[in-house]
Image (spheres, rainbow, N blue to C red):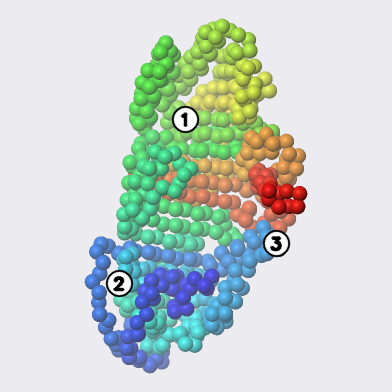
């Protein structure tokens, strides 16, 4: 770590921020030093300090960038590194605290420097600079939490120790860099000017109580950020997002971690995100919704979002209808029926929408889509219209194909195919033609044992729920049976991943909860070769037992306000701070779904090993 810290300033963050100013090596300014006065400490900068003024250069055009950085509870962060590496890499644990001390000694710092820092307190710095010429007009101030401010300075290399100015004030001159230091009972304050030194205490106070590590930048120049390298995004969205991010004026990075808390990483930016068309989204959610409380727990993946205005979605549906009608001559009537029903559903949705994926024991998949609705009758009729139209369309397709047995779909729609808790729902079943058997590998997790895909619809209790996949009938029945108040003992309202997403993002529009075990099971069984590997199956089961006992979860939250966006993730501390034995078992979770190693290339050779 100390390789990153020029040995000119005591404070790690101060050194980092001031490093650009050290690039130019010129003789130090002449300084008249006033002897330390008895009884001093904490007073204003003495006017007896006289420095020979340097020739000022014209400041660059534009506004300077402001950069604020802080760390609080550094000692516990270092302890987390030690505990986590002891668990996950027991043969090579990292004692970061001891490593830093050894590195400081190697670079000439005394042992008392590190021990004089208060690693439970706040270390903070605030700087402004011009990116094109950082040393010109640089301002820097901040504070280091200290058990002994004097001990920090005494621990610096003998040739680079600060010189006393009186009243607890010190000066450190290295090249053209002049840093003022001031002793306080529990801090060592620093700045590049007397005026900024007076702000040092307020900088530390403002940083206290936040997340463990925070970096905030404002007045950023245009074009600094983009999404050009986010290749996982669709090209159109990536281009649009890049155009928005290039107008970012403020950005921040926050990390919260420790032996007593979950791991949180959050990135945010102030930019015109309203260009994305955010009206379908409601206010960000920081707590579980009533809809989540009506849905079964144990989802591998769940996405919850607040509902806003459907206006933009209506326009999208209208455009889709025009395109489909032009390319589906003869099917205008069913297309119109489905689109009218879709418009009705959009108008009935309110409050919240949830999309979840539920796995079976052998990687079977069932997808659930649920929403709060205003009028159950209208929503139920609209869903029925879509299923009935699909039933008719499949029957017509079979007829046009001559009703050939091997090439026809089986299809049925039962008005009361779902019954539970006094609630009834529809069940649509679509069986695959026999001549498609060889093409169904990718869809097998969604099909039941008869190679049918089921779609069930239940509208009751203020919600409309659609299930699709292997266990659609079973899942819809479970939903229907749990709609009465108090009927459901566990639900998505207690999903650990959703809670992490909301905490990390401080309220999210797209709240994503991930169950690592269930997600790994889905990934393993989706691959034909991996699901036939008995060792992988055993590793997955062994890991699942430990992760379930520990309660591990992962959450991702996306917040999109009109002028600010945030992406945040959270990971349960139980997956970081654990015993080496548990870590070894949890590690099997990743091993069970890891791709098989590529075989080594063998050189082409002749009888004597020479390439012919």
Question: Which residue was labeled with disc 2?
Answer: 136
Viewer-side label of 3, 2: 2
- The answer to whether residue 414 shows anywhere in this view is no
- Residue 46, image x, y percentages: 32, 86
Residue 536, compared with residue 249, is above or below; it is above
Q: Tell me what residue is drawn at x 75 percent, y 43 percent.
A: 535
- Residue 542, image x, y percentages: 73, 45
- Residue 160, image x, y percentages: 45, 85
Residue 453 located left or right of residue 25? right
Give the Cα distance between marks 3 and 1: 49 Å
Whether the residues at callouts 1 and 2 have beta carbons within 8 Å, the answer is no
Residue 165, compared with residue 534, is above or below; it is below
Is label 2 in a helix, a strand or a loop? Answer: loop
Q: Which label is found at residue 372?
A: 1
Task: Please report whichever mark, 3 or 1, sits nearer to the chain's N-terminal start.
Answer: 3
Are there few (<14), some (14-19), or many (20+) residues within 10 Å of tag 1? many
Question: Which residue was labeled with disc 3?
Answer: 90
Q: Tell me what residue is drawn at x 32 percent, y 88 percent.
A: 30
Residue 437, compared with residue 536, is above or below; it is above
Give the Cα distance between marks 1 and 2: 58 Å
Q: Nearer the viewer, residue 289 or 405?
A: 405
């Amino acid at each position: 770590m100390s390789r990153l810290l020029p040995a000119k300033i005591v404070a790690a963050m101060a050194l980092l921020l001031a490093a650009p100013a050290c690039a130019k090596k010129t003789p130090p300014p002449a300084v008249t030093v006033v002897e330390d006065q008895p009884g001093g400490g904490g007073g204003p900068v003495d006017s007896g300090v006289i420095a020979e003024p340097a020739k000022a250069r014209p400041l660059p055009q534009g506004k300077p960038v402001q950069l604020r950085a802080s760390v609080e509870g550094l000692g516990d962060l270092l302890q987390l590194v030690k505990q986590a590496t002891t668990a996950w890499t027991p043969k090579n644990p990292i004692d970061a605290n001891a490593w830093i001390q050894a590195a400081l000694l190697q670079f000439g710092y005394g042992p008392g420097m590190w021990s004089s820092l208060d690693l439970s307190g706040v270390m903070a710095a605030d700087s402004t600079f011009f990116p094109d010429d950082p040393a010109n007009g640089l301002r820097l101030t901040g504070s280091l939490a200290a058990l002994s401010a004097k001990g920090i300075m005494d621990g610096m290399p003998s040739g680079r120790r600060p010189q006393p100015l009186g009243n607890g004030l010190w000066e450190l001159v290295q090249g053209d860099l002049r840093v003022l230091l001031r002793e306080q009972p529990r801090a060592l304050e620093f700045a590049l000017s007397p005026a900024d030194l007076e702000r040092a205490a307020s900088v530390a106070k403002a940083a206290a109580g936040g997340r463990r590590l925070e970096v905030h930048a404002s007045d950023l120049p245009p074009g600094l950020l983009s999404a050009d390298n986010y290749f996982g995004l669709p090209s159109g969205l990536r281009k649009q997002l890049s155009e928005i991010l290039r107008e970012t004026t403020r950005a921040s990075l926050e990390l919260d971690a420790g032996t007593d808390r979950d791991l949180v990483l959050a990135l945010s930016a102030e930019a015109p995100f309203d260009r994305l068309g955010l009206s379908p989204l409601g206010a960000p959610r920081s707590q579980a919704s009533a809809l989540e409380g009506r849905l079964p727990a144990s989802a591998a993946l769940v996405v919850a979002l607040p509902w806003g205005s459907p206006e933009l979605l209506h326009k999208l549906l209208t455009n889709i209808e025009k395109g489909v009608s032009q390319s589906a001559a003869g099917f205008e009537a069913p297309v119109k029926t489905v689109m009218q029903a879709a418009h009705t559903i959009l108008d009935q949705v309110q409050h919240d929408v949830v999309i979840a994926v539920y796995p079976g024991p052998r990687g079977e998949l069932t997808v659930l889509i649920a929403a709060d609705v205003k009028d159950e009758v209208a929503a139920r009729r609209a869903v029925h219209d879509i299923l009935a139209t699909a039933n008719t369309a499949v029957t017509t397709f079979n007829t046009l194909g001559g009703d050939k047995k091997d090439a026809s779909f089986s299809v049925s729609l039962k008005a009361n195919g779902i019954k539970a808790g006094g609630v009834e729902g529809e069940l649509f079943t679509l069986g695959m033609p026999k001549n498609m058997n060889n093409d169904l590998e990718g869809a097998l997790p969604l099909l039941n044992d008869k190679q049918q895909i089921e779609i069930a619809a239940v509208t009751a209790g203020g919600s409309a729920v659609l299930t699709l996949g292997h266990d659609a009938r079973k899942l819809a029945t479970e939903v229907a049976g749990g709609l009465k108040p108090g009927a459901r003992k566990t639900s998505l309202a207690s999903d650990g991943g959703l809670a992490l997403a909301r905490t990390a993002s401080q309220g999210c529009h797209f709240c994503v909860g991930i169950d690592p075990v269930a997600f790994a099971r889905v990934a393993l069984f989706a691959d034909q070769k991996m699901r036939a590997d008995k060792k992988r199956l055993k590793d997955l089961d062994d890991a699942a037992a430990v992760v379930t006992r520990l309660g591990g979860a992962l959450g991702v939250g996306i917040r999109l306000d009109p002028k600010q966006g945030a992406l945040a993730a959270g990971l349960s501390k139980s997956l970081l701070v654990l015993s080496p034995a548990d870590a070894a078992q949890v590690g099997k979770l990743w091993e069970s779904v890891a791709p098989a190693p590529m075989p080594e290339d063998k050189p082409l050779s002749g009888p004597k090993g020479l390439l012919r």
